[in-house]
Amino acid sequence: MNQQGNVPTIPNCFNLCGKIALITGASRGIGAAVAKLFAENGAQVIISSRNQQNLDELAATLNAQFSDQSPVTPIACHIGQPQAIDDLIKTIVAKFGRIDILINNAATNPFFGELLDTPQSAIDKTFEVNIQGYLNISQQVGKLMREAKKGCIINTASVNGIIPAPMQGIYSMTKATILSMTAALAKETAKYGMRVNAVLPGLTDTQFASALTKNEKLLQSILPMIPMGRMAQPEEIAPAFLFLASDAASYITGVFLPVDGGLLA
């Protein structure tokens, strides 16, 4: 309490004002929900995915909510292509000068079936985006953060990285790799003032997960495994990213944060 006996004002530790945040896979679902929440909390947000039109539409919708600013910038990029990542980073640095927060959220899951029957094309595509894409963009952005002596990387992993899901073997393997990459980067980059963490969403009502959420028989077999008995909405996953990106998590690195309704409990 201060000398007047009033309760002191506590700054909003979730405030991202002045931060430049890049979110991949941001045109819909969890990525879009994170973009909205970050913009609401003061960040200048660059949203990225493969489809420029979808990005433009989302940016227009979000920016319409902010009468005096345009906090969301749409830039298309296929993170499975190293040259596309190069171009994206160069464009952002030319316009904003830096990247303070990287959210690796873009992912693919092109095959639903058993590992023994997974075609090589699906294996290659899943590894290309979910592993190589995450690593390539983390290296590029991480070098900028290393030079700046600060920065935050948050990887979207999955509960599947802990417990492989039936018929999603390749996807689950890539998400387990992301957890290992998160831990390795966290240990290596802490000395540069960087933090690296992962969010592990459970079953979430998105187009990406529609093979599960729209299959009533399959859905009813999954829900009993979730103590809360339901799937999440993207808006319920996004606050975990805000927490880890904010000063509230200033002493947190190398953490795997499940947002799963109790599935991994």
Image: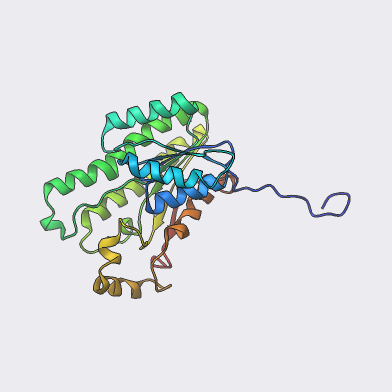
Q: Position of residue 75 (x, y in %)?
A: 38, 35
For residue 168, which quarter of the picture? bottom left
In the picture, which quadrant includes the C terminus?
A: bottom left
Residue 252: tell me if it is visible.
Answer: no
Q: Position of residue 115 (x, y in %)?
A: 15, 57
248, 94: nearer the viewer: 94
Residue 150: tell me if it is visible.
Answer: yes
Total number of numbered labels?
A: 0
Q: Position of residue 30 (x, y in %)?
A: 40, 53
Q: Position of residue 94 (x, y in %)?
A: 44, 24
For residue 201, which quarter of the picture? bottom left
Residue at the (36%, 51%) spot, across then down? 157
Q: How is the image coloured?
A: rainbow
Is 70 displayed left or right of 22 in the figure? right
The residue positioned farthest toward the right in the image shown: 4
Look at the picture and state if 120 lies above or below 149: below
Residue at the (44%, 60%) spot, across then down? 259
Residue at the (59%, 39%) spot, across then down? 68
The residue positioned farthest toward the top in the image shown: 94
For residue 144, which quarter of the picture? top left
Look at the picture and state if 33 lies above or below 216: above
